[in-house]
Image (tube, rainbow, N blue to C red):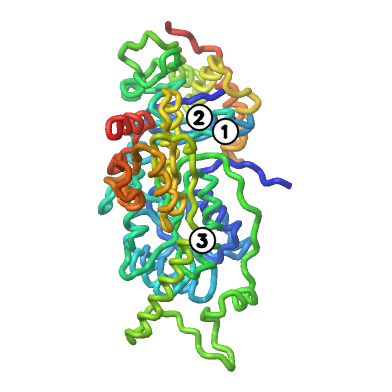
């Protein structure tokens, strides 16, 4: 039977999807605008059904280190927070990347810097795709633009994370977290059995059995030659991800003379701006990166041969615009339009900015 | 058909839950829906608003700069949203909290004295359902049966006994709504 269409917030969709995708453990600490994730899990009590652990830790730092521990045993684990809480988790995220551990981290962004505001923002783009934590690591970064994608990307993020043994992040914001839309949840996927974990994650710390060497989960390696080899292995993985996992959506791009580039909630608002522009006879298209890393560099570069200009629309002071400019490499004008600190632009503001900056 | 609606008033007036019931009713009717609240500190005693879109087609932006229908429940919200009603659009307000005359002449304006009626009904919680009744009389966005199904979906089961009272309040709102100009 087809799954029922439900109405729920993006945050709630993350929680329900976590249960349905067979997550073994969620570790979190409340912060607006994403507290409904843990709240929903606590109401649903999945420990009574699938056996999933839901734990409110004493801090964000504790939660990410619980994720490290769970992931080190081959379990399917996740955490969620919002911008200031993600800053606290960055040390742990760098360690997870360094130990090549799969896990899912959800960031429902709010305005910063510092404690900032609880209102929506996309100012953690740099933090997500340019490192954030220390060392040469990358995070697979998925940017949902609907409540349905909030649910779907829990599965996608976990699958990619386990495919490449590296952490994945869902980078959402207060708009997608708080809004309600229709959603169809995935079918219940059983949690992995102990046998499946041993088979799929032979590196995991499952208790040493006779006749094999100890599995050690660590990011520490004091022998520089070995550490360089480790780093080269990470980079090879990142290259495979860049080659195989770029995802994006093109809206009204085929005949576009101008292009908006926007992710997440901004892409939704831009879609309306495209409708308004088309009604005025302006050939405007929208390119929505779904993976922020790996970034859809090639497709954006190709549009540089077609359009007269691009506007990167982001709820920040100009972050993704740098990657758009790198892709375009000076071929056409690339401008940025943003609002800051929790203020959200309306579709008419975006259209006005396009005319002001590119016409 | 697409209806882009803003509901705005004080926190505690049931603005968000009225939007939620409208959204659930749309879901029951098989429409595309989006419900985007203003969330945050302004909900505590300040103004609260929610954008609800009901549409037969996919909804692009949940955030809008103009609206087909504005439901305004206090003066600060009137000051903010009166100018954001599309020409030819509809503005519905409760007379209790609105002191300044409405300036727009290019829209249809309706008044639902829900606060007074809720007090008469000795049930202040009926306020937002009276307003909803007024809206549904002016624009039958969704069928009443689907509103009742929507109520059932959006209310926790322990509150289902309140559904007949809500239905009564909706009918009351349908009776008392009147055109101002």
Is the N terminus of chain B in the top left, top right, bottom left or bottom right quadrant?
A: top right
Percent of width and height locating residue B162: 59, 32
Neighbor class of circle 2 (other Cα within 10 Å; few <14, some 14-19, many 20+) is: many
For label 2, the SS is strand
- For image coordinates 39% across by 15% down, the residue present is B95
Q: Is the residue A197 above or below the residue B171 in the image?
A: below
Q: Nearer the viewer, residue A274 or A139?
A: A274
Res. A117 in view:
no
Percent of width and height locating residue B136: 55, 19
Mark 2 vs mark 3: give the one in front: 3
Cα–Cα gap, marks 2 and 1: 8 Å
Percent of width and height locating residue A137: 37, 68
Query: Going from the N terminus, do you reach mark 2 or mark 1 first?
Result: 1
C-beta proximity under 8 Å, tags 2 and 1 = yes
Residue position marked by numbered label 2 in the rendering: B53
Residue position marked by numbered label 3 in the rendering: A244
């Amino acid at each position: 039977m087809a799954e029922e269409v439900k109405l729920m917030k993006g945050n709630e969709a993350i929680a329900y999807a976590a249960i349905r995708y067979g997550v073994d453990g969620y570790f979190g600490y409340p912060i607006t605008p994403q507290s409904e994730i843990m709240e929903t899990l606590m109401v649903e009590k999945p420990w009574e059904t699938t056996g999933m652990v839901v734990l409110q830790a004493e801090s964000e730092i504790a939660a990410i280190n619980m994720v490290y521990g769970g992931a080190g045993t081959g379990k399917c684990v996740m955490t969620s927070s919002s911008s200031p809480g993600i800053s606290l988790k960055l040390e742990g995220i760098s360690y997870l990347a360094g130990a090549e551990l799969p896990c899912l981290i959800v960031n429902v962004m709010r305005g910063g810097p510092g404690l900032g505001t609880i209102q929506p923002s996309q100012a953690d783009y740099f933090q997500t795709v340019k490192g954030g934590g220390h060392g040469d690591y990358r995070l697979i970064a998925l940017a949902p633009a609907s409540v349905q994608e909030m649910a779907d990307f829990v599965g996608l993020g976990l699958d990619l994370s386990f495919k490449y043994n590296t952490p994945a992040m869902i980078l959402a914001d207060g708009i997608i977290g708080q809004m309600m839309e229709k959603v169809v949840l995935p079918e219940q996927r059983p949690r992995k059995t102990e046998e499946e974990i041993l088979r799929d994650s032979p590196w995991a710390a499952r208790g040493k059995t006779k006749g094999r060497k100890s599995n050690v989960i660590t990011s520490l390696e004091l022998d520089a030659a070995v550490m360089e080899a480790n780093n080269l292995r990470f980079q090879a993985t990142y290259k495979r991800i860049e080659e195989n996992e770029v995802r994006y959506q093109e809206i009204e791009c085929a005949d576009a003379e101008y292009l908006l580039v926007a992710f997440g909630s901004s892409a939704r608002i831009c879609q309306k701006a495209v409708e308004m522009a088309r009604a005025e006879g302006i050939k405007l298209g929208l390119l929505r990166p779904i993976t922020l890393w790996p970034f859809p560099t090639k497709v954006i570069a190709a549009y540089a041969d077609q359009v007269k200009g691009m506007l990167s629309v982001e709820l920040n002071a100009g972050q993704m615009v740098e990657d758009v400019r790198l892709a375009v490499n000076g071929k056409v004008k690339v401008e940025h339009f943003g609002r800051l600190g929790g203020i959200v632009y309306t579709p008419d503001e975006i259209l006005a900015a396009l005319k002001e900056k590119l016409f | 058909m697409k209806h882009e609606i803003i509901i705005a008033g004080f926190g505690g007036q049931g603005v968000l839950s009225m939007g939620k019931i409208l959204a659930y009713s749309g879901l029951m009717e098989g429409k595309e829906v989006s419900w985007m609240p203003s969330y945050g500190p302004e909900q505590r005693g300040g103004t609260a608003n929610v954008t609800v879109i009901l549409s037969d087609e996919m909804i692009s932006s949940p955030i809008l700069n103009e609206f087909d229908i504005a439901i305004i429940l206090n003066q600060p919200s009137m000051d903010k949203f009166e100018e954001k009603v599309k020409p030819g659009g509809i503005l519905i307000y409760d007379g209790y909290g609105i002191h300044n005359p409405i300036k727009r002449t290019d829209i249809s304006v309706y008044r639902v004295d829900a606060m007074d009626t809720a007090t008469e009904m000795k049930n202040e919680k009926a306020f937002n359902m009276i307003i909803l009744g007024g809206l549904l009389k002016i624009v039958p966005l969704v069928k009443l049966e689907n509103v009742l199904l929507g109520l059932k979906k959006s209310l926790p089961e322990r509150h289902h006994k309140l559904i007949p009272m809500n239905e009564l309040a909706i009918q009351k709102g349908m009776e008392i709504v009147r055109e101002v100009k």
